[in-house]
Structure formats: C-alpha cells, structure tokens
Image: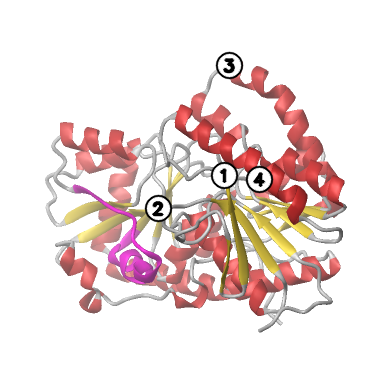
Amino acid sequence: MSSDPARPRVVFVNRFYWPDEQATAQLLVDLAEGLAARGWPVTVVTSRNARASPDSSAHEQRHGVTITRVGSPQRRSRSLAGKAFDYTAFTLALRHRLKSELAPGDWLVALTDPPSLAPIAAAVARRRNARLIHLIKDIHPEVAFAVARNWWLPCLSAPWIRWRDRAWRQAEFCVTIGQDMASLVAEHGVASARLRVIPDWAPGGETLAPVPPAQNELRHAWGVADKFVVAYSGNLGRVHILEPVLAAATLLRDEHDLVFLFIGDGPRRPALEATARTQGLSNVRFLPPQPRSRLSESLSVGDVHLVTLRAGCERCVFPSKLYGILAVARPVVFVGSPQCELAQSVRQRGVGLVISPDDPAALVAALRELRADADRRMAMAQAAARWSRETGGLAAALHAWAQLLETGQVRPTLSGLAGTVISPA
C-alpha cells in the first residue's frame, strides 16, 4: 500500500533494526512495517550493520519503510567501554542526521536504545518543530541502580535523570509497554494526559504458532525429544535473575528426563556457561539465538518456559518474551517479585506459577509438579493461548498506534496484561 500524503511522516529511532535479531529490532520491524502497510510514511533511523547491505550507511527501502543507517558499524562488545563507544558513535551521528531528516509536523518516535536518546530527541524535535513520542522500552539509569546496587551511582546520575525527565515532559506522549513502567514515569512528572500504555506482542505477529512435539524438528535436532524441557529463551541480560535457575538445575541434576535449555545470548551467558561447566551440570545446555523464521519451533521446544526479573527491575522493564510464550501456548514459571504486574497477571490468567527468586527449592518443586501433571500443563497452555488471542497481538498494537498518531487517544482499556484489551478495527 502506498503512503497517504495527507498523513505526517513517522520517524522511528532505535540503535537496532532489521536484520538484527534483538527483541527491540524485531518488534520495531513489526510496528514500522505494519504502519507503512496502513498508509503511514515511515522512516527508521538506526545504526550501521555490516550485514544490512553493501553500503550500510545509505538509505534503503524494505517493505514500505525507509531505513537510514548512521554512525560507525556496531562492534557488539560486551564490555562497558565497547558499549560506551557504540552509544557515543551512534548518538553523535544520529543528532547530526536528525537535524536534516526531520521536517516540521513529523512524528519523531524515540526508543530507549541508547539510553541517552531522550534528551537529544527532545532537543532536535523542538528545533525542527516535530512532534515527539518517547517509546519507553526500559528505564535507565534505574535499571543500573537495581543491577549494580552501588550507593554512589544514583548520586552521580541525578543530573542526567533531571535532564531525561525534562525530555519526557517535553514530549507530546510517553508510551510504555506496561502499567508498572507507566506508574514510574508518572512519578517523574509526566502528566497522565501525556502517558499511554501500549503493550508489546509476539514477534512476527500472526506467524507465531504452536508446533506439536512430533512435528518439531528442533526437539529431535537438539536431542530432547524424550525430555521434559524447561526453556529460557531470550536475552541473557543483567536484569534477568538466573542464579536460582542454575541452583534448581543443580538440585535436579540426577533426574535425567529433565533438561534446561538456555536459547539466546547476552552479557551473562559466558559466566552462566562457566558455572554450569564447573558444577558439571549436564542437564543444562546453551543454544544460540534462533532466527525469526524458526521462533515457532524453538519456543515450542519448551514444555515449560521460564521468565525471570531481578529485584528492583520490575518497574523498569517488561519481558516481551512473555508474548511469544503465550502465542505458542506454553505454561510460564515466573521467577521474580510476587507483587509485580507480571506476577499478578500470570496468577490471574492461570497461565503458570510464580516463584520467589530466594527459593530454588520451590522452583524445583514447581517443575516437578508440572512435569508430573500433564492435565495441569494443558490447562495452563489453553489459558496461555486464550490470553494471547485476547490481547489482540500486533493488530491491536497497530490499531492503538494509529489511533494515537491520528487523534492522540488510546482507549484506556488497552492492556496486554491482566486487564481487558481493545480489538482492532
């Protein structure tokens, strides 16, 4: 569908986009291409990627979206110095690019990678007379406070937080992906009239679906066809508490019909692999991230899926992996605070169990219980599939975004979690 010239252009900014496989990249592809298919002129400004095209700094068109790549090629370093270099190179190039890219009346939608993006986006949008939306996928530096737990970090970050908060308040809207996140943004001075919640969805929209075990090639390729598979699929990042999972694996090491699969990558993977090796945990396996085309199979490998959050991170991030798990109709075991939004939703919807991160023995008991009770797993799977349908997925999110861009309104019942949802028009 060609774009409607009467509609303002939507310019998304995020460090990652196609062909990257990060969750934010995949979800942004769905959103950008979905809006383009609805007639919106869409541009994505992102970082250079050696795999993207022979001339990755140039413009390119893909599925109706104009992609502009700036900055030095991503080094994908796990070190703080390497990340700082990537952030700085992208931010400086982005600021220069947006000055020429934005036109009066454009919508600038700034995501949160890199974390320094909010003030820069606010300054450029104001200078170019563009309308600004902050799409807040995670909240920094509060995430760092929860992970590092250094007394001096909040003190050093105070000026930056004031700068970021001012940028949030200058935007026409701040969009979060969960209610807990929205409440934290509100505490930083964003008026409720400017605050919206539009949840994420399963990557790939309607293409993600359950794959029966007998038809799942990956269960056979990975040698787990006869196992009860406890899967953790996604980013092995610092916000995810994974020590209790390895502790549970240690307690279950002699139960040879049960295996833990970590499918993905991230800064914590090397340390986790080293721990599993040192402790001789043959029931723990690490597998690379799977391409988008095989997500249905890889997510369906798990009989049960783990979702985890480190204490203090509950209001700063929301694990979008949940929506993929629901789409393939798998039970969820959430390891994290029982008071957070995600825990409450898992309980209320009947899709799984909530376990305190301080109690590996309870996690072991929960996994044994689910392994032994196929009927209970089936009931949770059916509840997961029902919840996935009721959220409306990508179609509902696209409807909400189109509504926001056209009218500034999103019906307040929209929620991908325990609440009700709107249906796509």
- Contact flag, marks 1 and 4 (Cβ < 8 Å): yes
Tell me where the magenta segment starts and ends, as one range: 284-304
- Magenta stretch containing residue 286, yes or no? yes
- Magenta stretch containing residue 9, yes or no? no
- Contact flag, marks 2 and 1 (Cβ < 8 Å): no
Q: Earlier in the sequence, mark 4 or mark 3?
A: 4
Say if residue 188 shows up in the picture: no
Element type where label 1 sits in the image? loop
Residue 70 vs residue 307, the one in the foreground: 70
| Residue position for label 1 | 71
| Residue position for label 2 | 234
Which one is in front in this view, the residue at disc 2 or the one at disc 3? Answer: 2
Q: What residue type is labelled 2?
A: Gly
Q: Which of marks 2 and 4 is nearer the N terminus?
A: 4
- Contact flag, marks 2 and 3 (Cβ < 8 Å): no
Q: Which amino acid does label 1 sit on?
A: Gly
- Contact flag, marks 2 and 4 (Cβ < 8 Å): no
Whole-percent x, y for residue 242 in the image: 36, 40
| Residue position for label 4 | 94
| Residue position for label 3 | 151
